[in-house]
């Protein structure tokens, strides 16, 4: 029986992965190396994240999303679930509004350079964030975490999003072939890094404050989220909270960690499969959930998803 072409490609990827299997946070073996893919396919991994950031920032600041700014970029994709206006202070509202407009530009830049796809279904509901924060904390928060309730909670929710995109751009950069896509990625990475730095700096200023009504500080919440992302990604330490032990700080001389970076103060990199494990909140690039209840779009995401369908007998 002939093997479908997508399956041949996926089996080739798996064959290339074997030397780089590591133990994930759940004890399973997870591949942590690069995958063989075109520039277009690699950058379209990031396009999924740009849709997520666009909707979260625009709704948070304005109470309306991409369809109110540039609906053509959504390409007929469904509107997000549960997104709404956040109760932000005036300063942060202006910053998040700016971030939202920047993300619209990112979508346009990616789509005009490598092509796009319909906006994936995104779950930005309070219920989804509450589930994520319960998992990060390791126990049910009471009342459930509401990212739209106030400025600090929104910033903590935002902490959970742009940094993953930053890691993704760093991760794909060495494997791009063409100058056009290399240039695009460098320019996107610059702004994504800036957004993440602003969010982390705003949280760092409040690091020792408790997040109402919980008996948990801002610092501890960032550590919870970072630990969860490391566990979901399954490829070691690539994420750190805003305050760390000095041995993890820059040159082992500081506990402040406004910018998360490695031993040489270089940005951490994540591969497409790590990204999907995290944003699906499943620890499995073939198991959708989290922010993408039906999975992400693009060839790489769909290949992972179809591999699960075949394993379950659904394909």
Image (spheres, helix red, strand yellow):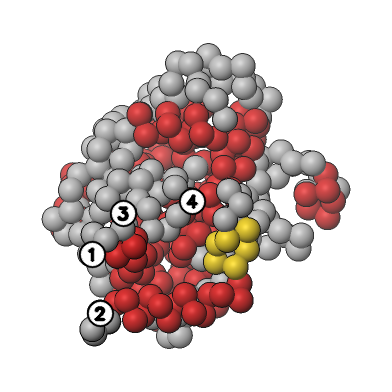
Against 55, residue 188 (above or below) is below
Label 4 sits on a secondary structure element that is loop
Label 2 sits on a secondary structure element that is loop
Residue position marked by numbered label 1 in the rendering: 315
Whole-number angstrom distance, CA of label 1 to CA of label 2: 11 Å
Q: Earlier in the sequence, mark 4 or mark 1?
A: 4
Q: Are marks 3 and 1 in contact (CB under 8 Å)?
A: no
Whole-number angstrom distance, CA of label 4 to CA of label 1: 22 Å
Label 1 sits on a secondary structure element that is loop
Q: Earlier in the sequence, mark 3 or mark 1?
A: 3
Residue position marked by numbered label 2 in the rendering: 4
Q: Nearer the viewer, residue 130 or 204?
A: 130
Q: Nearer the viewer, mark 2 or mark 3?
A: 2
Tell me the quadrant of the picture where the N terminus can be found.
Answer: bottom left
- For label 2, the crowd category at 10 Å Cα-Cα, with few meaning under 14, some 14 to 19 and many 20 or more, is few
Q: Nearer the viewer, residue 148 or 289?
A: 289
Query: On the image, which quarter does residue 177 sit in?
Result: bottom left
Whole-number angstrom distance, CA of label 4 to CA of label 2: 26 Å
**Residue, x 45% and y 70% (percent of image)?**
185
Q: Position of residue 294 (x, y in %)?
A: 27, 50
- For label 1, the crowd category at 10 Å Cα-Cα, with few meaning under 14, some 14 to 19 and many 20 or more, is few
Against 11, residue 226 (above or below) is above
Q: Earlier in the sequence, mark 1 or mark 2?
A: 2
Whole-number angstrom distance, CA of label 3 to CA of label 1: 16 Å
Label 3 sits on a secondary structure element that is loop
Residue position marked by numbered label 4 in the rendering: 283
Residue position marked by numbered label 3 in the rendering: 295
Whole-number angstrom distance, CA of label 2 to CA of label 3: 21 Å
């Amino acid at each position: 029986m002939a093997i479908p072409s997508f399956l041949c490609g996926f089996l080739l990827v798996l064959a290339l992965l074997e030397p780089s299997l590591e133990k994930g946070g759940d004890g399973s073996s997870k591949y942590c190396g690069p995958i063989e893919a075109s520039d277009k396919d690699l950058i379209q991994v990031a396009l999924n994240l740009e849709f997520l950031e666009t909707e979260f920032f625009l709704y948070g600041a304005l109470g309306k999303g991409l369809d109110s700014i540039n609906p053509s970029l959504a390409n007929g994709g469904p509107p997000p679930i549960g997104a709404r206006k956040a109760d932000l202070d005036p300063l942060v509202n202006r910053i998040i509004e700016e971030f939202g407009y920047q993300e619209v530009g990112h979508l346009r830049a990616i789509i005009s350079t490598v092509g796009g796809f319909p906006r994936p279904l995104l779950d930005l509901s309070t219920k989804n964030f509450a589930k994520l924060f319960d998992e990060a904390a390791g126990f049910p928060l009471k009342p459930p975490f509401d990212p739209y309730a106030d400025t600090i909670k929104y910033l903590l929710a935002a902490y959970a999003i742009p940094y993953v995109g930053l890691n993704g751009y760093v991760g794909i950069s060495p494997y791009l072939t063409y100058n056009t896509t290399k240039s695009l990625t460098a320019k996107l990475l610059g702004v994504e890094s800036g957004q993440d730095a602003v969010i982390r700096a705003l949280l760092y200023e409040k690091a020792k404050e408790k997040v109402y009504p919980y008996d948990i500080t801002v610092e501890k919440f960032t550590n919870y989220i970072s630990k969860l992302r490391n566990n979901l990604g399954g490829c070691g330490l690539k994420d750190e909270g805003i305050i760390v032990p000095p041995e993890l700080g820059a040159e082992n001389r500081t506990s402040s960690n406004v910018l998360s970076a490695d031993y040489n103060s270089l940005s951490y990199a994540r591969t497409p499969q790590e990204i999907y494990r995290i944003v699906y909140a499943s620890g499995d690039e073939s198991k959708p959930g989290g922010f993408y209840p039906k999975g992400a779009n693009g060839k790489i995401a769909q290949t992972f998803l179809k591999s699960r369908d075949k394993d379950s007998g659904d394909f």
